[in-house]
């Protein structure tokens, strides 16, 4: 009997020890795919129901498990919830309705985590597999930014993860792959002209398309937004459109160059004509300040009247193409010295030919 009681006590103690051990380490992950575009507009208002008391995110903070909790939180989610606490618009023009719910959720999160340990997830909580495959050099960027942003948002020190959390591997559609790859190329080309916070924001937000829990439709919407945002960045250095009429044999055509980045840019301009009716001289390298515009003068010389098109490209000092190629229609309404010279020479040759023919006729008649 004594042996039975001893064994029973050992079993009970073992079970209690297991329960205490499991209760001592309770991990709670607070993450959600982005519901905003890169410009800050909300795609939908689904966070309102998710943050409610009985919503998936609401239950995490209003009814968390007991024990020694460790919170793993994505700072991107906290930023979006904070953006909901004041008036906000959806992309369809409707007003957001989650201000009260968002304030309540943030208040409860601060209260329930006050004595708990908090670790920041990588910013945006992108898939570890796809980050390592598409942007391996940016791994530490997302880990460090996660801790930096979450510390700022919560107003308390948080821990940084050493590695990305394991997430389920999932297939990636072609649109998303191309959107992310293109965004990285455009960022690399234009980063020297961008402000540091602008680079950080664009790099951070671009990974939103790689969140493991996105639905197909959500991923498509975010991918289209990333493509649009990348295009906007790529055209911050650009040429203004225009058309020209040339009335002089030699003329300089003014083209406006715009730099909407904050930093100056040293640029070269490549100009080609679509046909031989006009000759184009080279244009010197240009230095344009940030947030400014300048006129560049394209020297042309008319060969003959008619129409042509000038194709103009901007290149960085590293010979990378910036922005899009711009086509300028040109109407040529002048007889150039070259054309006059060609006409004069042709007329002279024709006159000599006529004289020779006349001389030959006279000789034949005399013979």
Image: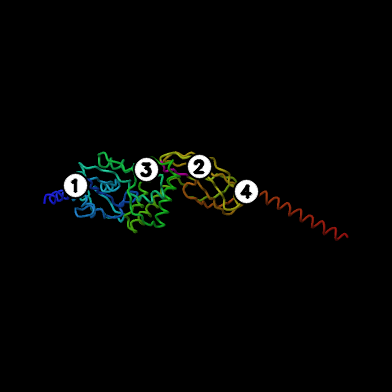
Report the Cα–Cα distance between label 2 and label 4: 37 Å
Q: Quick one: label 2, few (<14), some, or many (20+) residues within 10 Å?
A: few
**Marking on residue 141:** 3
Q: Which residue is mark 2?
A: 318
**Direction from residue 294 to residue 23 in the image, left or right:** left
- The reply to whether callout 1 and callout 4 are in contact (CB within 8 Å) is no
Q: Which residue is mark 4?
A: 336
Please tell me which of labels 1 and 4 falls first in the chain: 1
Tell which of 23 and 119 is nearer to you: 23
Task: Give the residues drawn in magenta, as a range.
Answer: 257-261
Residue 321 position, x and y percent, is 49, 47
Residue at horizontal 33%, vertical 56%? 218
Q: In this picture, is 354 found above or below 112?
A: below
Residue 39 position, x and y percent, is 34, 49
Report the Cα–Cα distance between label 3 and label 4: 60 Å
Q: Quick one: label 1, few (<14), some, or many (20+) residues within 10 Å?
A: few
Please tell me which of labels 2 and 4 falls first in the chain: 2
Tell which of 55 and 170 is nearer to you: 170
**Direction from residue 6 to residue 234 in the image, left or right:** right
Please tell me which of labels 3 and 2 falls first in the chain: 3
| Element under disc 3 | helix
Q: Quadrant of the C terminus?
A: bottom right
Q: Which residue is mark 1?
A: 17
User: Which of pointers 2 and 4 indicates the residue nearer the eye?
Assistant: 2
| Element under disc 2 | loop
- Whether residue 13 appears in this view of the structure is yes
Taking the magenta stretch, the answer to whether it contains residue 159 is no
Please tell me which of labels 1 and 3 falls first in the chain: 1
Report the Cα–Cα distance between label 2 and label 1: 65 Å
């Amino acid at each position: 009997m004594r042996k039975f009681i001893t064994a029973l006590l050992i079993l009970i103690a073992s079970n209690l020890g297991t329960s205490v051990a499991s209760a001592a380490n309770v991990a709670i992950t607070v993450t959600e795919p982005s519901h905003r575009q890169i410009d800050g507009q909300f795609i939908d208002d689904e966070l309102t129901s998710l943050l409610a008391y009985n919503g998936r995110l609401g239950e995490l903070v209003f009814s968390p498990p007991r024990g020694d909790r460790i919170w793993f939180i994505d700072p991107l989610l906290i930023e979006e919830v904070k953006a909901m606490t004041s008036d906000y618009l959806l992309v369809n023009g409707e007003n957001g309705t989650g201000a009260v719910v968002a304030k309540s959720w943030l208040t409860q999160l601060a209260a329930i985590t006050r004595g708990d340990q908090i670790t920041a997830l990588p910013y945006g909580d992108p898939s570890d597999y796809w980050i390592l495959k598409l942007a391996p050099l940016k791994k530490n960027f997302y880990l460090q930014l996660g801790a930096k942003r979450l510390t700022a948002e919560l107003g308390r020190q948080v821990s940084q993860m050493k590695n990305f959390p394991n997430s389920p591997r999932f297939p990636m559609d072609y649109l998303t792959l191309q959107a992310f790859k293109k965004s990285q190329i455009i960022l690399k080309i234009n980063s020297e002209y961008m402000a540091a916070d602008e680079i950080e924001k664009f790099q951070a937000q671009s990974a939103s398309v790689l969140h493991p829990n996105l639905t197909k439709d959500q991923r498509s919407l975010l991918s289209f937004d990333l493509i649009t945002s990348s295009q906007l960045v790529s055209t911050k250095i650009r040429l203004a459109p225009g058309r020209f009429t040339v009335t002089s044999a030699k003329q300089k055509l003014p083209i406006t160059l715009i730099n909407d980045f904050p930093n100056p840019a040293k640029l070269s301009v490549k100009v080609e004509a679509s046909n031989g009716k006009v000759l184009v001289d080279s244009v010197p390298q240009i230095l344009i300040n940030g947030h400014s515009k300048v006129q560049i003068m394209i020297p042309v010389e008319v060969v003959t009247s008619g129409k042509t098109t000038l194709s103009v490209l901007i290149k960085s000092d590293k010979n990378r193409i910036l922005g899009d190629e711009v086509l300028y229609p040109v109407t040529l309404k002048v007889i150039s010295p070259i054309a006059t010279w060609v006409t004069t020479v042709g007329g002279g040759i024709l006159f000599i030919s006529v004289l020779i023919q006349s001389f030959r006729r006279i000789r034949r008649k005399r013979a």
